[in-house]
Amino acid sequence: MSISTLNDEIKRLTNDIVTLQNKLAREKKNESDKRVKIANIKKTITKNTSASTLSSKMKQCEQLEKEITESVKKQAKLQKDIADKQKRLNDKSVSLLKEQQKEQKNQQSNQQKIIKSYEAKINSLQNTVDDLLAPVAASIKESVQTDDDTEYDVFISYASEDADFVDSLEKELHDFGIKVWRDKLSISWGDSIRKSIDRGLLKSKFAIVVLSKSYMGKYWTGYEFDGILNLETTTRKVFLPIWHNVTVDDVKAFSPSIAGRKAFETKSITAYGIAEKLKEILDENK
C-alpha cells in the first residue's frame, strides 16, 4: 500500500475515533444525568408520600434505570468500536513507518548513485581544473605575501548607523594607545571587503562588537560576527560585546548563545570607560 493511501487511511481512522469518543462522552453524560434524576426523585419520597405518588415515582425510576441500562450497552459498544479503530490505526501507522523507511532507503540508494556519478565526473576534471587554477593560486599567494602585516589590539564590528558612538570610542581607544582596526580606516578603495575583514580579524587580539538593532539586520556585520565567534577557543577570549540601545530580549532574538555574556551597555558606561577597561585587559595579557 502506498504512503499516500496509508496517510489517507490514518486520517480517516483518526477522525472516526474522534467522532466515536465524542459519542461516548455524550452517552456517559446521558447516563450521569439519568442517575442524578433518579437520586433527585428518591429524595422527594418521604413517609408522607401517598401510595399513588410513590407508585408514579417508582415507575419513573424504573424507566430511567432501563434507559441507563441501554446507555451502558451503547457505551460498551462504542468502547469496543474505538478499540477496534485504534488497533487498525496502530497497524496502519506501523505499515506507514515501514513504507517510509523503505522509501528513504530507496532515496538514499538513488542519492548514492548520483553522488558517485558526480564524483566520477569531478575526478575526471580535477587535473584540468588544477592546471587552470595554478596561475591564479600563484597570484593569490603573491598577494597574501605582500599584504599588510600590521597587528591590531582590537577589531571594531559595528553598523554604519552607530558610527557616531564608534567615532567617540575610537578616539578614546587611540588616546589610550590602543591600535584599532576599523573598516573606514583599514579598507582602502578597491580592496576586497571580505579579504580585508578576514585579515583584520586574524591580526587583532580582541574584537569589540557594538550590538544594536541596526547591527542585527546587516549582512557584513553578520559576516564579521560569525568570524569573531569562530576565532574563540576554550583558552582564548576574543569577543567583547557592547549593547547599544538594545534589550536582553533583542540580543536573545539575535543570538541566544551570547545573551549570557558579560557586556557593557552604552547607557551606563562612557566610551572613555570602555577604552579604560580594554586597556586593563590588554595590559593583563601582555
Image (cartoon, grey):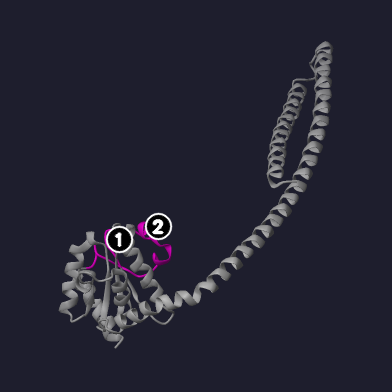
CA separation in Å, label 1 and label 2 = 13 Å
Lateral position of residue 65 relative to residue 257, left or right: right
Q: Is residue 21 left or right of residue 124?
A: right
Q: Amino acid at mark 2?
A: Ala
Magenta stretch: includes residue 260:
yes
Residue at (18%, 80%) from the top-left corner? 176
Which sits in the foreground, 121 or 49? 121
Q: Is residue 56 visible?
A: yes
Q: Position of residue 80 (x, y in %)?
A: 81, 38
x, y percent for residue 123: 54, 73
Label for residue 215?
Answer: 1
Q: Could you tell me the amino acid type at mark 1? A: Tyr
- Residue 232 appears in the picture as rendered: no
- Which residue is label 2 attached to? 253
Q: How far from the left and from the top, in percent, is residue 37?
A: 74, 24
Please tell me whether mark 2 sits on a helix, a strand or a loop: helix
Of the pair 61 and 255, the residue shown nearer to us: 255
Which residues, given as a range, are shown in magenta?
Answer: 242-269
Question: What residue do we see at 75% from left, 50% from top?
Answer: 95
User: Whole-percent x and y of residue 269?
Assistant: 23, 68
Point 30% across, 58% down: residue: 246
Q: For numbered disc 1, what is the local secondary structure?
A: helix
Question: Which of the two residues, 18 or 152, is positioned nearer the viewer here?
Answer: 152
Mark nearest the camera among 1 and 2 is 1
Circle 1 crowding by C-alpha within 10 Å: few under 14, some 14–19, many from 20? many
Q: Are marks 1 and 2 in contact (CB under 8 Å)?
A: no
Residue 55 location, quadrant: top right
10 Å crowding of disc 2: few (<14), some (14-19), many (20+): few
